[in-house]
């Protein structure tokens, strides 16, 4: 939000209502200003005073309308102004390097830069790769800035990655809470301590027996509980996270050492893609 515009709108609103107050009772404000300036009201011409007050009232009313319109316009701009698109990435090329054209710019009708061999698609000497996943936009942007001057074309895209949250050992949900509590008491009688009865949600009346990072530990726990006569099960818990990939085109005879230039971690990998 433009903070300066918001402050100006608030000040304009305050001044507009002050001007309206003057327009409604100009005689009081006329005397107030004379007292403030130390001027005595010695003019005996009453009609002349009333004319001055009417002029003051008209000017203040017009000022009120103008400031009110300014305030409403500022509020509308703050509320409905389009936010900048986070996908719009601009890079300043190094001296002597032709400006790169992103795929989105090419599709939008951007004209190729003279002398740039990177604009036209389908070059026989091009090869294209995709690198990722990058966990954050900042990592992706840093890598993209490092690679942009050396690639023929470059773009980024969003994706979703499934990440394991561990392996959950549990007893399937019982029909009632009383049954689940009975199972919990039976586990306690067999010296099982690490359990929890789920009391709400989709897994209500399920008996949780632990969440393990390693599958081998989860299977060991399941086997232990099954050996006591309980139908324990294991399921992998997963979640989806946003990740980012960078696609770039390069000269086939001069492959780009992207890992060295971008300083990417070992988790970032590459894969060949069709050229764009």
Image: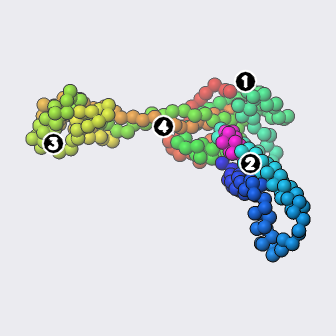
Residue found at x 38% / y 39%? 165
| Residue at numbered disc 3 | 192
The image quarter in which residue 207 lies: top left
- Residue 51's x, y, as percent? 88, 57
Sequence order check: which comes first, mark 1 or mark 2? 2
Sequence order check: which comes first, mark 4 or mark 2? 2
- Residues marked 4 and 2 touching at CB (< 8 Å): no
| Residue at numbered disc 2 | 68
Of discs 1 and 2, which sits in the foreground?
2
Q: Mark on residue 241?
A: 4
Residue found at the very far bottom of the displayed protein: 38
The residues tagged by marks 3 and 2 sit, at their Cα atoms, a distance apart of 72 Å
The image quarter in which residue 175 lies: top left
Sequence order check: which comes first, mark 3 or mark 1? 1
- Residue 43's x, y, as percent? 88, 69
The residues tagged by marks 3 and 1 sit, at their Cα atoms, a distance apart of 65 Å
Q: Mark on residue 122?
A: 1
Magenta residue check for 15: no
- Residue 10 in the figure: left or right of residue 61: left
The residues tagged by marks 4 and 2 sit, at their Cα atoms, a distance apart of 47 Å
Magenta residue check for 80: yes
Q: Which residues are magenta?
A: 74-85
Secondary structure found at label 1: loop
Secondary structure found at label 3: loop
Image: 211 above or below 49 = above
- Residues marked 3 and 2 touching at CB (< 8 Å): no
Of discs 3 and 2, which sits in the foreground?
2
Dot 1 alpha-carbon crowd within 10 angstroms: few under 14, some 14 to 19, many 20 or more: few
Residue 75 visible in the shown view: yes
Secondary structure found at label 4: strand
Dot 4 alpha-carbon crowd within 10 angstroms: few under 14, some 14 to 19, many 20 or more: few
Between 127 and 198, the residue placed more toward the observer is 198
């Amino acid at each position: 939000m433009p903070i300066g515009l918001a402050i100006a709108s608030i000040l304009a609103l305050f001044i507009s209502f002050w001007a309206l107050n003057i327009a409604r009772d100009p005689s009081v404000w006329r005397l107030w200003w004379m007292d403030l300036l130390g001027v005595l009201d010695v003019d005996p011409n009453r009609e002349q005073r009333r004319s001055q007050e009417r002029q003051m009232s008209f000017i203040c009313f017009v000022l009120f309308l103008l400031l009110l319109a300014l305030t409403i316009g500022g509020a509308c701009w703050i509320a409905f102004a389009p936010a900048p698109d986070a996908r719009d990435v601009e890079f300043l090329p190094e001296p002597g390097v032709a400006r790169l054209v992103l795929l989105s710019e090419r599709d939008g009708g951007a004209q190729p830069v003279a002398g740039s061999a990177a604009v036209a698609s389908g070059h026989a000497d091009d090869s294209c790769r995709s690198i990722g996943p990058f966990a954050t936009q900042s990592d992706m942007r840093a890598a993209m800035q490092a690679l942009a001057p050396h690639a023929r074309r470059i773009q980024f895209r969003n994706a979703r990655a499934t990440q394991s949250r561990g392996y959950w050992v549990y007893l399937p949900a019982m029909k009632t809470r009383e049954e689940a509590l009975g199972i919990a008491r039976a586990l306690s009688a067999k010296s099982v301590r690490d359990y929890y009865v789920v009391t709400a949600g989709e897994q209500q009346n399920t008996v949780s027996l632990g969440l393990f990072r390693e599958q081998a530990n989860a299977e060991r726990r399941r086997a232990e509980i099954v050996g006591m006569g309980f139908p324990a099960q294991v399921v992998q818990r997963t979640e989806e996270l946003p990740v980012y990939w960078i696609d770039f085109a390069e000269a086939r005879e001069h492959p780009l050492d992207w890992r060295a230039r971008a300083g990417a971690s070992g988790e970032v990998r590459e894969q060949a893609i069709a050229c764009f």
